[in-house]
Image: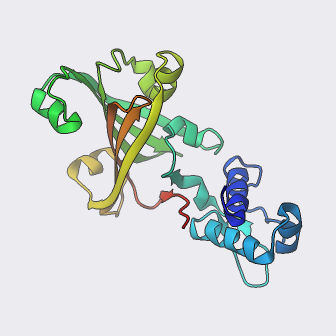
Amino acid sequence: MASKYVQVYTDLKRKIENRELDIGQDLPAEGELMERYQVSRDTVRKALGMLENQGYIQKARGKVATVSGRGAYSFPFEKIASFKELNAHLNRKTKTDVINLEILSDGETIMDLFGDDEEQEVYDLLRVREIEGERVIIDHDYFRRSIVPNLPLRACRDSVYEYLEKEQGLQIGYATKEIFVQNATEKDRKYLDLGEYGLVVVTKSYTYTKDEVLFQYTESRHRPDHFRFVGVAQR
């Protein structure tokens, strides 16, 4: 079972993400949080410290904490979630542009991506994500056609995961992720509104089915000012 401060942190984080606590709103005072969660002051302060470090709240000496807008741009590292799911409760205007959707049959590329010389074809999907009128994410996905035989354009514009799980019955299991910072490329500058930013945050994800079969490889490239990747680590 998670530590008490993690439980408090998780509950407050959920309320912020679900807009039960809106941007600019004051959090309850420490004493009220202690009573509400039946925990010590130290536990409350640890939970608030985590929220502050991850940009969900702002604290000032002698004042109660207030909800910050930066938490709205946090991407959880500990779960698999689609762009649609991440934005479902954030009340912000988003748009997905499908730049490319095609079938690749190049054996060398497939081997590099999936380590499988028997896979014949993969879907190559390139999308640009727009938030509040700014292009801030490039998502480049590859799906094995032996597992994803059909990938309609409507799903690519809406939610691929929703389509795979609800219409195709695919059971998604887990993903391994890598994150690093890289100099922006010509492709980044073509598709993203980078302005003066010279770096992008890159995540590479390998996603597996419940049966532990790798079916998706994703490279996401993010404009750095809007996004934090967050998770909870315990000893």
Query: In percent of the image, x 29 and y 20: which residue is there?
Result: 145
Residue at horizontal 68 percent and vertical 61 percent from the top: 9
Considering only vertical position in the picture, is 7 above or below 141?
below
**Which quadrant, please, contains the C terminus?**
bottom right
Vertical order, 181 against 133 (above or below): below
Image coordinates for residue 19, horizontal then vertical, percent: 72, 49
Q: In this view, does 49 lie to the left or right of 120?
A: right
Residue 84 image point, x, y percent = 54, 35
Give the number of marks: 0
The correct choice, above or below, for 95 with respect to 132 in the image is above
Q: Which of 162 and 208 is in front in this view?
A: 208
Q: Can residue 93 be seen in this view?
A: no
Q: In this view, does 10 lie above or below 113?
A: below
Front-most of residues 117 and 102: 117
* Colour option used: rainbow
Quarter of the image for the N terminus: give it. Answer: bottom right
Kindly tell me whether residue 147 is visible in this rendering.
yes
85 on left or right of 22: left
Q: Residue at x 24, y 24 (%)?
A: 122
Question: Residue 45: percent from the left, percent from the top?
Answer: 72, 75
Q: In the rendering, at what x and y percent does residue 205 appear?
A: 35, 44
Residue at coordinates 58% horizontally, 70% vertically from top-left?
53
